[in-house]
Amino acid sequence: MSEQSASSSPGGFLEGFQAAQADPMSTFVFQKVQESCPVKATIALTLGFALGGAFGMFMSSVDTGQNMEEFNKMKFREQVRFTLKDMGAKSYSSAKNFAVVGAVFSGTECVIESFRAKNDIYNGLAAGCLTGGALAARAGPLGIVSGCATFAAFSGAIDSWMRNQ
């Protein structure tokens, strides 16, 4: 199919795209769905899982977790099997962690933003503090305070940098 026939044919892709843009109700519904907190948290969870998996795969290449003398004594197939198993385990572990952090932070920030009805740096700071504190809850009170401060500072720095771009 030529480029000309695709764009000029009745019901072609471009006409359908333009019709979707022209319908204000579908645009309004799509915007409201996209702005909802569960959707934002799900998007952050999914992208966090993907990014965490890639990060875990990279980190598994840096840290083998195996004594190199023992590793070199293995046959080639055993080395490949061990490496792939290690990559999979580290990728999955990192993916789960990134997904949880992304979903908790994004969901918390969205709820705070909805409650305050403002979009400013304080939403990210509060969400960072709550997320960092919640993730460090097993470490006790000192861990909660340091997790809150660290995650809020990191969130504030990123948010400030993004707003100045």
Image: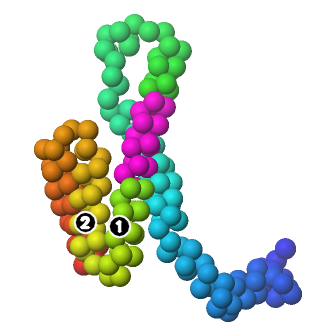
Type of amino acid at the residue the image marks with label 1: Glu
Q: Is 32 above or below relative to 100?
A: below
- First in sequence: mark 2 vs mark 1: 1
By what rule are the colours in the image chosen? rainbow
Which numbered circle lies on residue 109?
Answer: 1
- SS at mark 1? helix
> Is residue 140 shown left or right of residue 89?
left
Residue 101 lies within the magenta run: yes
Disc 2 target residue: 126
Q: Is residue 135 above or below residue 153?
A: above
Q: Secondary structure at mark 2?
A: helix
Q: Residues within 10 Å of mark 1 (few under 14, many from 20)?
A: many
Residue at figure coordinates x 73%, y 89% from the top left: 19
Residue at the image position 48 percent from the left and 9 percent from the top: 75
Q: Camera-side residue: 117 or 79?
A: 117
Q: Quadrant of residue 86?
A: top left
Is residue 78 at all visible to an observer of this figure?
Answer: yes
Report the side of 120 relative to 104 (left or right): left
Q: Quadrant of the N terminus?
A: bottom right
The residue nearer to you, when weighing 15 against 121, is 121
What x and y, as percent, mark residue 32?
55, 79
Predominant SS along the magenta part = helix
| Image quadrant occupied by the C terminus | bottom left
**Which residues are drawn in magenta?**
87-102
The answer to whether 161 is drawn above or below residue 78 in the figure is below
Q: Amino acid at mark 2?
A: Ala
Q: Residue at x 39, y 69 (%)?
A: 111
Horizontal and vertical percent position of residue 132: 26, 52
